[in-house]
Every structure is written in structure tokens, then in C-alpha cells.
Amino acid sequence: MKKRAKLEDVASVAGVSTATVSRALNNPQLVREATRRRVEAAVAQLDYTPHFGGRVLASNRTDTVGAVIPTMENAIFARGLQALQETLDEAGVGMVIATTDYDPAREAAQIRLLLNRGVDGLMLVGESCDPAVYRMLERRGVPFVLVWWWRMDCPWPCIGFDNRAAARAMAERVLDLGHRRIAMIGGIAHDNDRATARIRGVRDALASRGLQLGPGKLVEVPYTLDAGAEAARRFMSAARPPTAIVCGNDVLAAGALIGCRSMGLEVPADVSVTGFDDIDLATVLEPALTTVHVPHVRMGRAAGSALLRALAGEEKVTSAVFETTLVERGTLAAVG
Amino acid sequence: MKKRAKLEDVASVAGVSTATVSRALNNPQLVREATRRRVEAAVAQLDYTPHFGGRVLASNRTDTVGAVIPTMENAIFARGLQALQETLDEAGVGMVIATTDYDPAREAAQIRLLLNRGVDGLMLVGESCDPAVYRMLERRGVPFVLVWWWRMDCPWPCIGFDNRAAARAMAERVLDLGHRRIAMIGGIAHDNDRATARIRGVRDALASRGLQLGPGKLVEVPYTLDAGAEAARRFMSAARPPTAIVCGNDVLAAGALIGCRSMGLEVPADVSVTGFDDIDLATVLEPALTTVHVPHVRMGRAAGSALLRALAGEEKVTSAVFETTLVERGTLAAVG
DNA sequence: TTGTACGCGTTATCAG
DNA sequence: CTGATAACGCGTACAA
């Protein structure tokens, strides 16, 4: 286990100064062709790689951005992250991930941790933190972008979609199909802006028809299959069960499907079910899930290039909205 | 955007030397209670956080480990990663993720990238790299552990399970249920030791009964739903279709289910299907997937604490095998 | 185009 | 228990 080569070693092998080696590596155009070649040869010969700490200390950049997501357990954020990762990768920027379990306090803590690790930028999911946190980021000059989230007049840059409008559109479709007894299985709204917005959207749609979510017709549960199944069973064993269950995301909807199935109920004959997010899961269900498609990949890429631009120039990150679309598959039918 | 406080600032506010501040922060027990309190007060007052680069340069550690996985697209590695992450977190060690898309060249490249970023240790999936890569890691003294993988006499530390034996056990169960015309949808074996081992395991089982995978009865495809569906359709439209399709993982099995369904075939009445990995997906399928359960979380945790030990003491990482178990759900039935 | 020399913020050694 | 001070490896003014 011999010592690693340093810039100085390369310099002496190449017969140039350390400054020239550094330039040859970071700004090749500032160095004469022949010199650069000698340096490259020396680098290869010594198997030199720059020391991370040294570089960070001197340049005050880590070329790393942090991604803070609620959880990796379900696949909701996987595609988006992968897209972000790939985008950053092309620019030689790394990514480190932290998870919050949907807890804003944990989120703030993780952000602080990432800052201590010197990340140059941040991708955050939603706007669940205390505004003070975002202000702190601005004050420290750390570029960040909120994803999976967008609202008019959001004071922070967000690259996402209008959760509320999308949920409303889905609920309106349900209403258009004649459903009147509608129940909703939502995520836990407290501290979760997206869960909140989706519930609001459904309420909006009902209100526009002079209806509302009846008492007990909204439950908020963690995003797990079991919770979804359990909630659906409760709904469906009521005296007058709903004809449609709108769910806050696909995991809950899948759970609901399982719950209904376990009671011998048929979807959509006995009850319709809708999801949100359009993760892979949605297509393997039987029947396949009617849900709201979210452009995970495009969002991830957009977030990545926005951050890259912010890291490169002075350009501030600007918000962007993406359209969501209703994808009708098999779990939603006209009320029968 | 004012300048951040440095150790020196804290020192002068606290009226001590920088050395003492550093100790108070990193080895509190070496500092008198009263002094420590003054330092802590100064830290709080100045909102001081250590500079990452400075710390790395001086200590030559980043307190970060790298995790290199094939992909985040499907949920196979999510639970394990989350467990790893949590374990490391408790020790204040960060995690950075890189993906390889099942390409060993990319894997080697990502490893190099992570090393350049100064990771103190690595978690790798499987043994797909050129041995030279692992040797290089050993030479550089970077602790690493192979997960999702274990074989006798593996020269590198691995914390995983015996893919071959597990696949064999599953196939034997299929045989025990009377199946003789068996087909397999495997992952692409080239450069993927786990995919290879799973195929071998199935072959082992068949061979032990004097059978084999007939010509055209094994296809290797990427781990996607579509590929699984397509392969299943091909198998099932043959003159004498198989009575059971053994799949290299759950995603392929889910795809196979979709494929069969699309042909109007019933599982398991018309054909049995088995998976591997036991990801969440397996339980939402209808019928639920009979598959091989892999202890994702325990593996992730074990990998994490092994790496932590390696980072802390000189203790080398030692291998560990986990048991897999057959979980029989609804997609495998006796041949009928 | 290249070289010199210094600073970046911590940790660690060693003396007190 | 504390302080002075020398590394740590790289980037970059500034000078040549």
C-alpha cells in the first residue's frame, strides 16, 4: 500500500511546475499541447488522481449536490433521482442522497448535514421545510430547487407540477363518470404539502359540483400497501360504502386494491380506485391502475440542469411547471 | 451572504487556541468541562460548522462511503440501500450512490469516480468487476464489501446469499409439484454473476432430476416488465408451451404475468410463474407472486456495520451468508 | 505559456 | 489539560 502520488510528483516527473500540472488538468486550453502531453503521460505513469480534500479546500467546491427525498422504500422518487443523477454525471458532478421519512425536522437536519459535507447545491422534495431553512440556503448562497412541487407565487424555485390541479382533474373525471359517494385515502397531510394539495384538489372538484368528502370519507395514512389495504377495507365495510376511492398515490391505491380483493370485492365493478404518480407498480396491477401520470424523468433532468447552471454561472434557478396527464387504465369505471 | 466562521474565529471568541477548539469538537473528553462549554458557546454564537475540505485534507478521511448499484429504476436495491444508509447515518458516515446499468465497465468507472471523491469505503453489488479492480481497492487500502452475492472461497468479502442454491431450491420446488416442461426467463448473464448463478441453480435442479432446460427454453433479457412480458408470450405461443416459467427476478416475473394475462392465460391454472427477490411488487400482483425471499434489510445493515468496523479499527471485513427462503404465494401450483 | 509562492481550514504532534 | 506550529494537497494571483 504505497503512498499516492501528488501534484508535486507529477510535476517533477513531467519536468514542469505544479501550477502547470494543475492547469493542464483543469484548464487544458491554457497549456501548450506538448506540455500537456508530458503532463498526461506523467499522470498515467504515476496513476495520479487529485486529492479530494486538497481540491475542495483550495477551490471551495465539492462538485457534489445533495438530494433530499422522503424515502427510498417505494419507487416514487427512483426514476426522478436516476434522471437527476445521470444529468449531473455528465457534468462530472456527484450526488449524495439523504432521506427524511416525511419528517420536516429530519429534513432540516439532513440539509444541515449535507451542507456540512460541502454540497454545492440541493434538490429538495416539496416545500415542507420551515421558510427559515430556505432563507438560510439563500443567505449561504447554496443553490437549491424544490421538485415534485409547484405552486403559483412560490418564493422558492420549484420544478414540478401542480399537485392540487392534478388531483382535482382526477376527481372531476371520477365525478364525470357518475360517482357521488367518493372516499379518499390520502397521505398524511400534516407537514406534507403534496399530500395536502392532493386532498385539496379532490375537495375542489367535489365542491365545484356542490359535494364534499363526507365525514369519515377521508383518511390520512402512511404511504404503505398495508395502510392502503386497511383503509379500503374500512371504507368498504361501511353501511353505504363509496363507489369510488381516490388515493393520494399509487402505493395507497395498490393497497386499496389488495384490501378490496381481500373482501371479495371486484374493482372496478364493485368499486373504482384511482392512484397518483404512475409508478411502474400501476401497470402490473390487475386491473391496471388508473392514475395521474407525473413526468418523473423530465423533472429529474430539468432539476439537474437547473442546478448545473446555477453552479456554473450566476444564473439563478428558475421555476418550471410540468403537465400531468390522466392515464385511464382499468380501475376506474362509470358508476354502475 | 457573509463569510463563514472558521476555527480561528471560534478560538478567539472562546479565548482559546484553535487546537483546543478542534479537540473540544472531536475529542470532547480531552478538554476540561468549563473550556468545552466556552467553546460550544462560541460555536453556537458564530454558527460555526467545520469546513469539509479542510477537515478532509487534514484528516485524510471523508466519513463517506460509496454504494455502487446497477440501477435505481426498479426497487430491488432500495430497501437494502435504505438500511445501509441508516446504519451509516448512526455513525455520522455519509453515503453516495452511483449506478452502473449492469455494465462492468461503467462499474469500474464509477468506482474510480467515487475514489476520486475520497470515499472511505465501498459497497458493491455482486462480483462483476475485473479482479484487478478489487485488487486495486485492496492495494489502496479502501475497505469494500460485495453484497447480494456470496460464494464459497470468494476471495473478496461478501455479505449476501447463495444465488445459485436459492434458485436451485426454487426450481426443485417447481419440479416437486410435477412440472417437467419448464422454461426460464433470466437476466442477462453476461457480466452479471447473480443472473448467471440463478440460471445455473435452475439448471442444477433440473439436472438432478435428469432433465435440462430444452433448446429455446431459456431466454436472457433485461430486467424490465416489458421484456418479461414479451418473453412469456413467446414461450406460451410455442407448440408445447411450458407448464412453469421460472424467472430471474420479480420484475421479470411480474412482466411474465402481464404477458400471460395478455394472452388470456390464467396463472397458475394455465402456467405457473416464479420470481426472485421478494420486492414489494410481489405482494401486489394477482395472484401474489411465489418467489425467493431475500433479507434485503439485514444484508444492508450487515454491510453497513461491516464497513463501519473496517473504517474504525483495522478489522478486515469478513464475509457473511444469509439464508433465503421460499415464499409460496399464488403463482405456483401443481401441474395439472 | 510557464513558474513562484502563498492561502485555503483542519488535524496532529510535541512541548509545556 | 492547553498552545504553538507544522503538515495536508491543490488552486491561483502574480510575476516572468
Image: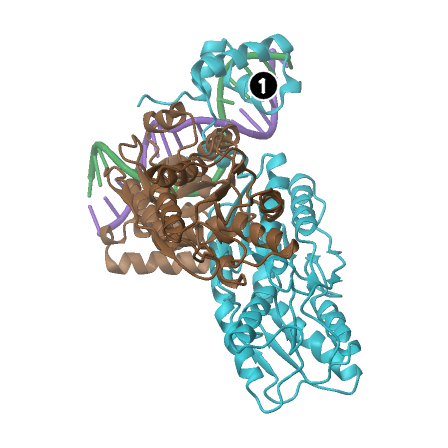
Chain colours: A brown, B cyan, C purple, D green
Q: Residue at x 61, y 84 (%)?
A: B217
Relative to residue B41, is residue C11 depicted above or below?
below
Relative to residue A140, is residue B111 depicted above or below?
below
Q: Residue at x 46, y 32 (%)?
A: A111
Which picture quadrant has residue B208? bottom right
Q: Which residue is mark 1?
A: B24
- Can you see residue A305? yes
Q: Residue at x 41, y 35 (%)?
A: A57
Which picture quadrant has residue B315? top right
Relative to residue B313, is residue B198 depicted above or below?
below
Relative to residue B156, is residue B218 depicted above or below?
below
Q: Nearer the viewer, residue D10 or B153?
A: B153
Q: Secondary structure at mark 1?
A: helix
Left or right: residue A142 compared with residue B142? left
Residue A93 x %, y %: 38, 48
Residue B58 x %, y %: 51, 33
